[in-house]
Image: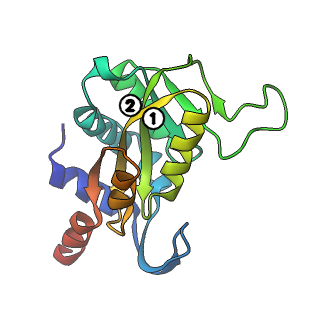
């Protein structure tokens, strides 16, 4: 397994962009982490999944992994392969055809779920996913983010009653940027 610094450096090399950007939450920022650049690279994705597996609670405390569509789905699939736990996809809204569900995959009521998110800024998207899970009688027990932008998400998520951990922080990436 890659060291923390090696993994942060790989994510930095693949996905850390500078310039003028707007985040999902509407904030203007001078750096952006393009999650698709690290989550579509098989080497980085495998390392991210291995690291997430070390951050998960005891396997007996959860039944499934969940990921909000679209960005975190490949990450959840990779974590599922490492942990041998099934994963489900949380839609942003009910689809208007077929099953018309807001959650895709096999699950049963009262399943306990670890939620995987790609990048957290304010925490809004992952909390919306947790609300959808609860509306479908599932219980989110922990959240793991690959990247914590360190802009209030952890505090917001903890205030909502969830525990959270992350693989890499914005601080980690900024430190690597200073070394380049």
Residue under the point 43% across and 38% down: 115
- Locate the C terminus by quadrant: bottom left
Q: Is residue 177 above or below residue 123?
A: below
Quadrant of residue 107 in the image? Answer: top right
Identify which residue, 96 or 77, lies in the foreground: 96
How far is the residue under mark 1 from the one under mark 2? Answer: 5 Å
Answer whether labels 1 and 2 touch (C-beta < 8 Å): yes
Where's residue 157, x and y in %?
A: 39, 53
Where's residue 21, x and y in %?
A: 51, 78
Residue under the point 55% across and 66% down: 24
Q: Which mark is residue 76?
A: 1
User: How many residues crowd around disc 1 within 10 Å: few (fewer than 14), some, or many (20 or more)?
Assistant: many
Side of 40 where 93 appears, left or right = right
Q: Secondary structure at mark 1?
A: helix
Q: Is residue 101 above or below residue 122?
A: above
Identify which residue, 169 or 16, lies in the foreground: 169
Q: Secondary structure at mark 2?
A: helix
Quadrant of residue 96 in the image? Answer: top right
Q: Is residue 93 above or below residue 53?
A: below
Where's residue 67, x and y in %?
A: 50, 39
- Locate the N terminus by quadrant: top left
User: How many residues crowd around disc 2 within 10 Å: few (fewer than 14), some, or many (20 or more)?
Assistant: many
Residue under the point 55% across and 34% down: 134
Side of 67 where 42 appears, left or right = left
Q: Which residue is mark 2?
A: 79
Task: Find the residue positioned furthest to the right.
Answer: 97
Q: Is residue 41 above or below residue 148?
A: above
Side of 81 where 166 appears, left or right = left
Q: Which mark is residue 57?
A: none
């Amino acid at each position: 397994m890659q060291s923390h610094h090696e993994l942060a450096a790989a994510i930095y090399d693949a996905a850390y962009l500078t310039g003028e950007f707007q985040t999902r939450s509407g904030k203007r920022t001078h750096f952006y982490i393009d999650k698709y650049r690290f989550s579509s690279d098989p080497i980085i994705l495998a390392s991210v999944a291995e690291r997430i597996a070390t951050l998960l609670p005891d396997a007996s405390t959860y039944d499934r992994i969940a990921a909000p569509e679209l960005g975190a789905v490949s990450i959840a699939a990779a974590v599922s392969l490492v942990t041998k736990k099934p994963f489900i996809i949380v839609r942003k809204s009910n689809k208007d055809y077929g099953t018309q569900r807001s959650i895709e995959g096999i699950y049963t009521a009262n399943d306990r779920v670890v939620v995987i998110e790609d990048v957290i800024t304010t925490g809004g998207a992952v909390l919306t996913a947790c609300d959808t899970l609860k509306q479908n009688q599932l219980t989110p027990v922990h959240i793991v983010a690959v990247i914590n932008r360190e802009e209030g998400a952890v505090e917001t998520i903890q205030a909502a009653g969830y525990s959270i951990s992350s693989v890499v922080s914005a601080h980690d990436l900024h430190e690597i940027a200073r070394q380049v």
